[in-house]
Image (tube, rainbow, N blue to C red):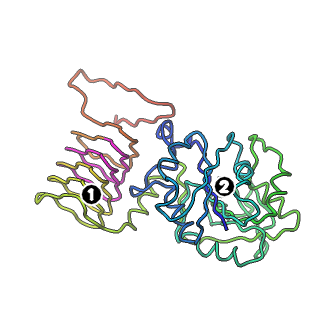
């Protein structure tokens, strides 16, 4: 059985972070999101994994390598255009062949991994299995209607309340999916939809089974979702101290500090993760914060936030909270000038000022 990870999305809801970086590489607890998906597939015994990439393909390749660090083999598939999930699967057929496979989105993380799901499908006779979870607002998702242990209907973002079981972005298929994809017509978005392919299987009498996921599911499409996912995953980190901590500093709770990091006259309250070679001085790092490698935080306080690689926060009065700070960003005190606001903002940015 093979695995296929879709990582070609542009991540428009995470702009401006994704103007220059792949959304699948945003770190959660100082680990890129896509790494969690890879680790779940490896834990389920899958050692051949295809990764579908788009405009940020080179970044993805550099980050994940050839798969040897996980003991697996990667095959990269260049999607010719942003044509939808089913289009990405269609262009992956040379890699997938006629094998059964599991399809995962690279920016979703689920509690408990996919071991049971893969085992059920590998040993079962079903043609397709889809992962569903209960949601409060089904109008924001594709949902499935069930009869017993069978899927009978799929509806994308329903206007009426027909089901509260949302698709979470994990699907398993056998070879019956290929005629279904070949029969697809582009949706109103101009894309080949994976939900339409599954609906084709249902309508043509194939065995489509639901797998109801009862744990947490992290959809990291928006900033607040990323911050919440970081909070949950930080609570699961293994505490370890590999950096240098001076006697004037205080470390409490579940904290991981990477090699080469320096903690000077600072307080770190876990759960928190400090990356390799980070420099923390006269600072407070509060719970549910992750500070990536090569960052500097000096004379500043931060809590419930993500600071990405190489960023610098110096001399800030007041605590920074619930923030996502991109790579090599800098937050510093402005020169003493008459009071005024001066901004250079990327597309779709948001700034909140206290009145």
Q: Residue at x 77, y 63 (%)?
A: 98
Report crowding for label 1: few under 14, some 14 to 19, many 20 or more residues within 10 A (C-alpha).
some
Q: Nearer the viewer, residue 48 or 340?
A: 48
Q: Image check: 64 left or right of 169? A: left
Number of numbered discs: 2
Q: Provide the residue designation for mark 1.
A: 259
Q: Which mark is residue 141?
A: 2
Is there CB contact under 8 Å for labels 1 and 2?
A: no
* Label 1 to label 2: alpha-carbon separation: 42 Å
Q: Image check: 354 left or right of 200? A: left
Which of marks 2 and 1 precedes in the sequence?
2
Q: Residue at x 33, y 42 (%)?
A: 310
Tell me, yes or no, whether the highlighted magenta stretch contains residue 323: no
Which quadrant, please, contains the C terminus? top left
- Asked which quadrant contains residue 146, the reply is bottom right
Q: Which mark is residue 168?
A: none
Q: Nearer the viewer, residue 70 or 191?
A: 70
Q: Residue at x 16, y 52 (%)?
A: 264
Residue at the top extreme?
338
Q: Nearer the viewer, residue 141 or 124?
A: 124
- Asked which quadrant contains residue 190, the reply is top right
Residue 125 in percent (x, y) is at 77, 76
Residue 298 in percent (x, y) is at 21, 44
Q: Image check: 12 left or right of 250? A: right
Q: Nearer the viewer, residue 152 or 259?
A: 259
- Asked which quadrant contains residue 79, the reply is top right
Give the extent of the magenta segment.
282-311
Residue 215 in the image: above or below residue 81: below
Residue 146 in the image: above or below residue 273: below
């Amino acid at each position: 059985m093979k695995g296929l990870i879709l990582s070609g999305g542009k991540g428009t809801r995470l702009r401006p972070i994704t103007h220059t970086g792949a959304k699948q590489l945003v770190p959660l607890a100082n680990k890129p999101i896509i790494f969690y998906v890879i680790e779940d597939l490896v834990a389920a015994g899958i050692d051949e994994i295809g990764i579908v990439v788009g405009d940020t393909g080179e970044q993805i390749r550099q980050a994940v390598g050839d798969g040897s660090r996980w003991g697996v083999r990667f095959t990269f598939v260049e999607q010719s255009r942003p044509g939808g999930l089913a289009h990405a699967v269609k262009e992956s057929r040379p890699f997938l062949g006629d094998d059964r496979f599991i399809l995962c989105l690279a920016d979703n993380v689920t509690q408990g991994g996919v071991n049971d799901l893969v085992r059920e499908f590998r040993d079962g006779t079903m043609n397709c299995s889809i992962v569903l979870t209960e949601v409060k607002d089904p109008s924001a998702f594709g949902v499935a209607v069930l009869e017993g242990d069978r899927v009978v209907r799929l509806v994308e973002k329903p206007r009426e309340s027909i089901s509260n079981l949302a698709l979470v972005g994990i699907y398993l298929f056998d070879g019956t999916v290929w005629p279904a994809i070949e029969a697809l017509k582009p949706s109103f978005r101009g894309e080949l939809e994976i939900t339409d392919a599954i609906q084709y299987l249902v309508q043509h009498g194939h065995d489509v089974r639901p797998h109801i996921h009862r744990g947490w599911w992290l959809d990291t499409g928006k900033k607040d979702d990323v911050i919440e996912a970081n909070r949950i995953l930080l609570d699961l980190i293994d505490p370890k101290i590999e950096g240098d901590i001076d006697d004037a500093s205080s470390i409490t709770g579940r904290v991981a500090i990477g090699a080469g990091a320096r903690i000077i006259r600072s307080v770190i309250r876990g759960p928190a993760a400090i990356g390799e070679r980070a420099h923390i001085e006269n600072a407070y790092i509060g719970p549910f914060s992750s500070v990536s490698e090569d960052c500097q935080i000096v004379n500043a306080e931060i809590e419930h936030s993500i600071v990405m690689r190489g960023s610098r926060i110096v001399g800030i009065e007041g605590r920074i909270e619930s923030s996502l700070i991109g790579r090599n960003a800098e937050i510093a005190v402005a020169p003493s000038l008459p009071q005024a606001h001066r901004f250079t903002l990327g597309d779709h940015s948001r700034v909140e000022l206290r009145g």
